[in-house]
Amino acid sequence: MSDLSADAAAPEHPGTAPSGGNPAAPGGGRTVSSAVPPSLVARLAAGITATGDPDLVETVAPLTGERLAGLPQSSTADVEVAYELARRAQPGWAALPVRRRAAVLLRFHDLLLKRQDEVLDLVQAETGKARLHAFEEVLAVAMAARHYGRAAHGYLRDKRRGGALPVLTHAVEARRPKGVIGHISPWNYPLELSVGDALPAFVAGNAVVNKPDTQTALTALWARELLIEAGLPADLWQIVIGDGPVVGPAVVEHADYVSFTGSTRTGRDVAQRAAARLVGASLELGGKNAMLVLSDADLDAAAAGAVRACFSSAGQLCISIERLLVHRSVADDFLERFAARTRALRLGGGLAYGADMGSLVSVRQLDTTTRHVEEAVKAGATVLAGGRARPDLGPYFFEPTILDGVTPEMAVCSEETFGPVVSVYRFDTEDEAVAAANSTPYGLNSSVWTRDHRRGRAVAARLRTGTVNVNEAYAATYGSVAAPMGGMGDSGLGRRHGAEGILRFTEAQTIATQRMMPIAPSFGLDDERFAAVMTSGLRALKALRFK
């Protein structure tokens, strides 16, 4: 594997930067090969449930295009073994008090913050993203661990509910773990979308069989090691990897509940398979998210926010903004500011802070991004910034790109690019902007920029997305871990975070105890007299405003 940078001083980037292209970030930090040595790969790979002598699948370091790791693939038989091990471990874990389970999450929180540099290296090596964007994953996971570590007892405790007959009926709602969760997580946020989604499942008393994307499996395996160090029983979190169309259905086939993050197309298949077995599923899927810049927006703040919204993790973020709706009266001024900031972004792949944007993850993502931009330009769109690959920096780098003059027949208008590309559209009225934002089958995230917070919240209420950020890109809603996060329409089902994020991994059970008298004719009442007494009672309860 070639070096990204020398341990002391970085070599020059290969090739020559194109005229007017984004500047290269200064080098520095460790090399990928020194940060992810074979000994680390072998240690982490031991956590994969794979028996016999399985074929190795090679992963690639996006920053260099060269081999990163060889990992054993799990078979469908291995998936069955994983479920057997998880099912044996789950009852003992569920029998522990909630506070004992929550303590594991709080210890994990502290270990994660203490040893974050280890996982930042892994996330960068496997995804190619800038270190600051990798750190966002550490933030998200730590916040979820803290929240569910502190709040799980309140979410899961037995709750008194109104009984059939006041005083006479004592009703309690209890929460029981589903059992073993089948958890399929993608490559783009390998720490947050593997362990971040598993934490509430664990604290609710479940075991997890996780299929991370093979490209980013090392990050999930590292997180598993850290949770075990924090006190999680080792068999409670099983990790299987392999070809998605083979291993994925096997994970769904044995699950008591399915948690999936990925494409809408695959999500539909997962939902159908889960429904056929009458098990629940939560699905966070694709998006074509819009940012609205209203006429009274602070244009400098909005331009800085748009850079975060569109180009974090090179746009490989489900809640990233791909459509920019700007009021016509401020469009020119805003775009001048936004384009200048975009052109100034520093691109690079060193395992250190300093780059503003990293690489795409694969040739597939590069091809899609290139195709969307080239087809749009050929059909008449104008490039305001970026618009080209940067092989001088690495095999999958693509400049952050702003397109103007995009029309509906262009693929970039309606298809999810999942790359550092945003299209600009102008509007004259708020009604027009809301209609344009809602003119997509997706409904994941949106962003509204205005100096008037009340106005911003009013516009937000009209947008058909699961999260809406006012004067922020995506972090305000995603970081509010006590509130639910998820999509509408083709962007999915269910929610992560908050009460819904943990209760999805439980079954509701009602226990009602009847006292003194049955709910049936008694004390000498015949059927007709019983009906008359109950009728009078119901009228009285309504008059007394009982719920």
Image (spheres, rainbow, N blue to C red):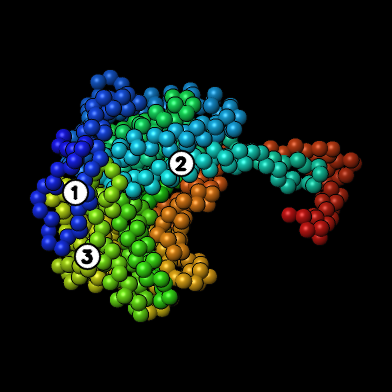
User: Mark 1 or mark 3: which is in front?
Assistant: 3
Badge 1 density bin: few <14, some 14–19, many ≥20, Cα 10 Å = many
Residue in the image at 86% along x and 41% along y? 522
Rendering quarter of residue 382: bottom left
The reply, left or right, for residue 103 in relation to residue 270 is right
Q: Callout 1, which amino acid? A: Tyr
- Disc 2 vs disc 3: Cβ atoms closer than 8 Å? no
Residue at the spot of label 1: 396
Q: Callout 2, which amino acid? A: Ala
CA distance separating discs 1 and 3: 18 Å
Mark earlier in primary sequence (1, 2)? 2
Q: Is residue 362 visible?
A: no
Residue at the spot of label 3: 385
Rendering quarter of residue 301: bottom left
Height in image: 334 above or below 465? below
Horizontal and vertical percent position of residue 170: 75, 40
Horizontal and vertical percent position of residue 409: 24, 68
Out of 150 and 83, give the one closest to the viewer: 150
Task: Indicate which disc residue 334 carries.
Answer: none
Height in image: 41 above or below 521? above
Horizontal and vertical percent position of residue 302: 38, 67
Task: Say what secondary structure mark 2 lies in.
Answer: helix
Q: Callout 3, which amino acid? A: Ala
Task: Say what secondary structure mark 3 lies in.
Answer: strand
Q: Is residue 74 visible?
A: yes
Residue at the spot of label 2: 142
